[in-house]
Amino acid sequence: MSPADAKDSPLPRGFRPLIMRLHFYAGILVAPFLLIATISGGLYAIAPTIEQFVYSDYLHVDSAGPALPVAEQIRAARKERPDLTVAAVRPATDPGETSWVLFTDPSLGESERLAVFVDPATAHPVGELVVYGSSGALPMRTWIGDLHRNLHLGEPGRMYSELAASWLWVIAIGGVYLWAARYRTMRARGTATARLWTLDRVSQDRNRTVSWHGVAGLWIAAGLVFLSATGLTWSTYAGQHVSDLRSSLSWTTPTIIKALGNTPASAPAGDHGGHEMTLAAERAVNIIAANVGHMDSVLALARENGITGKVEASIPSTTDTAFTVAQIRQPWVMANNSIAIDGTTGTVTDTLWFADWPLAAKLSAWGIQAHMGILFGLANQLALAVLAVALVSVIVRGYILWWRRRPTRNPLRPVGRPPARGAWRHIHPGAPVAVVSGAVVVGWFVPLLGLSLLAFLLVDGVLGTRQTPIFSRVVSSLRRLK
């Protein structure tokens, strides 16, 4: 068959027309959300490195000499903020670093704590900042993270990021299929400029834009699927389904046991409720003060049991709670172990080794750390930044292709038209059943994907009615009446 015959031949029987139409609508309607998530996500990925410079005065000191006892550092921080309850400490491990003494603050948001940074050599506080989550994100990274997560709109805003993550893998896989199909067609026609993995530098204008859109999309597709999968684990609706699935398969992340089992009996409040509450608060303060004195021995015992490197040690406020010392997520640290210790007796009450986690829990932890740019340090951050830049270029060129597709002589169609209708006619008669069944299952597991897909179908149906002869006759009649 000659190239001319191939050009005039009907569309091949297969899924290409259907996937093309889906890719078009998803790209046009979901891409704005993807663009915001991509830019904010790229900034978040490199934020751990940037904040080392932005907050250098808090994180680094010039003092030399051995570190003072951690208990002394904590006491210095408590004098700085006597109005708050100390909750944990992250002792400095390298020369020139500060120790973080973490306080609970009722005025802060969920997962936020106040950190007082202390010079370990002098026990002198150098400043305080709000930190977020177990990763210890400082204000700049927290702000970028909230933009990426919910556009600073709170819980309702999380729907934007979940919608973007829900469609990202569909757009990526569909794009790979379409690009590979286009390459095979061009090879069959004997087109000299056919390229799969490399950019077509010979063609100009639209063909060159198509080449960049396809080649760049192909190179980053695996990374996009990874970001989509790991991002959905944090989402509201799909994330809950992921959690339920992991629970049913016993793939959940295990937790260390903190309870000591020596809870003292408490007297009923009766008419002296306020007095009892005051006594309870004083008792908690005394318990914390006593536990601060145990901190250095607790940390030493944790190190003896293999909990080394950068750690966070909790400070119990009750006598029935153990100290917990957990390794912090750090670059190139593939295991995060933790230990529970009775500070009064100096005995280990529980240990939780990463090696004993279920495989799915390990993969989830690694995936989340890689998604955040933590797992492999600067290399991880640079890879995510490059991925973000590439995805932005793919999205922008997709919109350029859509704009150039518009008919310049038809004022009634100011934008590019979608691919040809009738995709279902080009697949096997039994395929629609499989496609619809698969869409229902995926739409249930990823609800925002399912709901938005229904919306796309409605939009497509409305656009389809405008192309029917009846609609055209009605429009013509209305114009004649004018």
Image: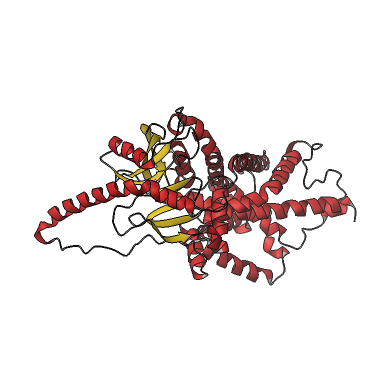
Instruction: Count the marks.
Output: 0
Q: Residue 241: where, in percent of width, then height?
A: 49, 64
The residue under the point 28% across, 46% down is: 289
Considering depth in this image, is 245 or 367 the residue closer to the camera? 367
Q: Is residue 18 left or right of residue 163?
A: right
Q: Residue 247: where, in percent of width, then height?
A: 48, 67
Residue 458 visible, this angle: no
**Residue lying at the far right of the rendered structure:** 2
Q: Is residue 261 above or below residue 217?
A: below
Q: Residue 482: where, in percent of width, then height?
A: 53, 44
Q: Is residue 158 left or right of residue 374?
A: left
The residue under the point 32% across, 65% down is: 261
Considering depth in this image, is 158 or 194 the residue closer to the camera? 158
Which quarter of the rendering shows the N terminus?
bottom right
**Residue lying at the far left of the rendered structure:** 271
The residue under the point 76% across, 54% down is: 181
Q: Is residue 350 left or right of residue 453?
A: left
